[in-house]
Amino acid sequence: MTHAVRAMFPACLAIACSLPSHAATVTEQELPASVLACMSSASCFVMTTSSHESDTASAFPIFHLTGDGMEGNWLLRYPLVPPSGRTGIHPPRFEGHGGHLWLMVEGRYDASESRHPVTLYLDKVDPAPTPFYGQEGDLSLYVSTADLLAGDSHMTVGLGYGGSYGHGDLSGETPLPCLADGCRVHARLNLLQLSYAEAGPDLVFAGFNPSDSRGLLYRQEISYLTGDPFVDMHDVQAYYVSAVPLPAPAWLMGSGLLTLIGLGKRRHAHRRTD
């Protein structure tokens, strides 16, 4: 264990008093491969006992080492439930998915930046999802300030006979758009049970939202609908969780990390953990 990693433990202990009585514990092998690689290089450290637990999600603090100290962020593990999977026509398909989808968000974002990184880790989804139109491996996504505060983000782009169109602020490794009239690409990300607030020049993690009963975590789709059944295409990949709201006291479960996050420096670039 490196000196830098040992130095994390006094700060990590500040969270221990906030652990839920039914906290979950994961092994390192259950973590996403990119996170495990980060730990192996001593660039980050994960507390493998959850600081927040519900039927919808488990939250694990992750600490990144930087030249200026340490940053506290969150790893969320979402158990997938039906109808998670991939469906499509032409060719017809259905691939059901279980396992877990992991998500990483930062404990603190710079409000002066227009885009804020969120990473989806798909390697613990079972069976492994087939690549979706230009995607491979982890998905690095970006949300706007307004979307981060609202807890959801989306994008739609397409080509119509009157030209191209688009709306929404979700960006990053979304599906590649098709280049034919009638093509449409859509993606939506919901930051389930996460709450952020403005704090001066920053956007900071403000706790877990006990009233969030949304079931959709992430959905992406591409369609080409002309009315001709021999050429029409509609392909959807979606991940759902159990939509069970938390009891009100769980709102405070993340408070132990709030002061810890203040020890870190603001990040000005999207760090990938692979």
Image (cartoon, rainbow, N blue to C red):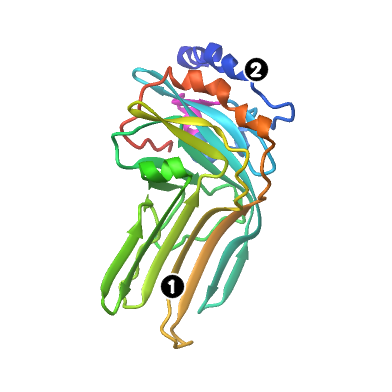
x and y percentages locating residue 108 in the rendered image: 42, 29
Side of 3 where 193 appears, left or right = right
Image vertical order of residue 148 relative to residue 50, above or below: below
Check residue 209 for magenta coloring: no
Side of 170 where 20 appears, left or right = right
Which residues fall within the magenta stretch? 36-46
Residue nearest the viewer, comparing 42 with 188 = 188
Residue receiving disc 2: 17
Q: Quadrant of residue 23?
A: top right
Image vertical order of residue 30 relative to residue 264, above or below: below
Helix, strand or loop at label 1? It is strand
Q: Residues within 10 Å of mark 1 (few under 14, many from 20)?
A: many
Tag 2 or tag 1, which sits nearer the N-term? 2
Answer whether residue 187 is visible to the viewer in this image: yes
Image vertical order of residue 82 relative to residue 111, above or below: below
x and y percentages locating residue 260 in the rendered image: 49, 19
Residue type at tag 1: Ser
Q: Residues within 10 Å of mark 2 (few under 14, many from 20)?
A: few
Helix, strand or loop at label 2? It is loop
Check residue 45 for magenta coloring: yes
Q: Quadrant of residue 256?
A: top right
Residue nearest the viewer, comparing 59 with 124 = 59
The residue at the point 55 percent across, 14 percent down is 9
**Which corner quadrant holds the C terminus?**
top left
Furthest toward the left, the residue is 163
Residue type at tag 2: Cys
x and y percentages locating residue 27 in the rendered image: 65, 32
Residue receiving disc 1: 223
x and y percentages locating residue 128 in the rendered image: 57, 55
> Of the residues tagged 1 and 2, which is closer to the observer?
2
